[in-house]
Image: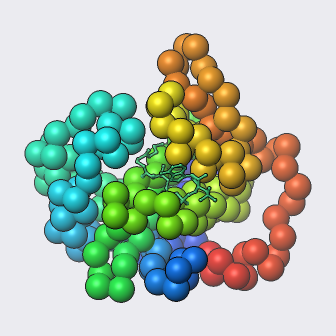
Amino acid sequence: MPSDQRLAENSGDDRVPVLWMLGEGSFINVRAVQPQDEAEMIRFHESLSERTVYFRYFHLLQLRRRTEHERLSRICASDPARDMVLIAKDDEGSIVAVARLSLEENSDEAEFAVLVADAWQHHGIGTILLRTLLWRAREQGLNRVFGLVHPENVPMQRMCRHVGLDVSYSIEQEAYVAECVFANSPPPRTECHLRSGW
Ligand SMILES: CC(C)(COP(=O)(O)OP(=O)(O)OC[C@H]1O[C@@H](n2cnc3c(N)ncnc32)[C@H](O)[C@@H]1OP(=O)(O)O)[C@@H](O)C(=O)NCCC(=O)NCCS
């Protein structure tokens, strides 16, 4: 199977929202982003603090740039063979988090990134999205998933360790690399698959 098809498999299922209950009893829906989510994505970006933007992009990527139609339409209608973009929505339909898994060119490795709105951080959403991405990556037969984490981004380093990723500093990248090599981990458990609904 060519590696660039791996994220495309079962893409129909990704559009079906999965309901998650957070620790304090509120709910989020997680599903793949769709073109009609673009307006809500703009509102999501408008809500982000400079600190959150800096940690995600490693620099202060301007709101204007983040919400450009060309950029957002590419994300909201991304090629499922290369990118998996998940959104989490609250009860009112507002996007509260976005997570992305991007296949590296000509490889069976993918890079992840997670972005949670300030008001929703530290409620377990980042963990849900990262675990979902890891599960899907593994299910699709990818070999390695990795993310770059800013050296000052202690919450993300903690979260990555929390979900079982190896986190180590890379002098070359001037960042922490959080990674999971699936060949090193035990086979998936069926009950996890059924529970997550993916
Ligand atoms: C980093 C980020 C994705 C974490 O998502 P989240 O939904 O807040 O994380 P969770 O609630 O799932 O927390 C998981 C763990 O992360 C750590 N954590 C999260 N927020 C934290 C905070 N503000 N301070 C300290 N630790 C924190 C904790 O270890 C936590 O586990 P615990 O509560 O059992 O101690 C989110 O804070 C975020 O979007 N930050 C800005 C963008 C960013 O840094 N993206 C990562 C780029 S790769």
Q: Can residue 22 be seen by looking at this rendering? A: yes
Res. 42 image quadrant? bottom left
Q: Is residue 145 above or below residue 136?
A: above
Q: Is residue 111 above or below residue 23?
A: above
- Choose between 192 and 5: the one closer to the eye: 192
Q: Position of residue 13 (x, y in %)?
A: 53, 78
The residue at the point 50 percent across, 18 percent down is 174
Q: Residue furthest top?
A: 172
Q: Position of residue 23 (x, y in %)?
A: 57, 77
Tell me: 126 left or right of 3. left
- Choose between 68 and 148: the one closer to the eye: 148
- Choose between 175 and 77: the one closer to the eye: 175
Circle count: 0
The residue at the point 34 percent across, 64 percent down is 119
Tell me: 105 left or right of 119. right
Q: Position of residue 92 (x, y in %)?
A: 29, 85
- Choose between 15 and 30: the one closer to the eye: 30
Q: Can residue 18 be seen by looking at this rendering? A: no
Q: Is residue 94 above or below residue 1?
A: below
The residue at the point 22 percent across, 69 percent down is 40
The residue at the point 60 percent across, 50 percent down is 159
Q: Quarter of the image containing the C terminus? A: bottom right
Res. 28 image quadrant? bottom left
Q: Position of residue 56 (x, y in %)?
A: 38, 42
Res. 39 image quadrant? bottom left
Tell me: 5 left or right of 165. left
Q: What colouring does the structure picture have?
A: rainbow
Q: Residue furthest right?
A: 186
Q: Residue furthest front?
A: 24
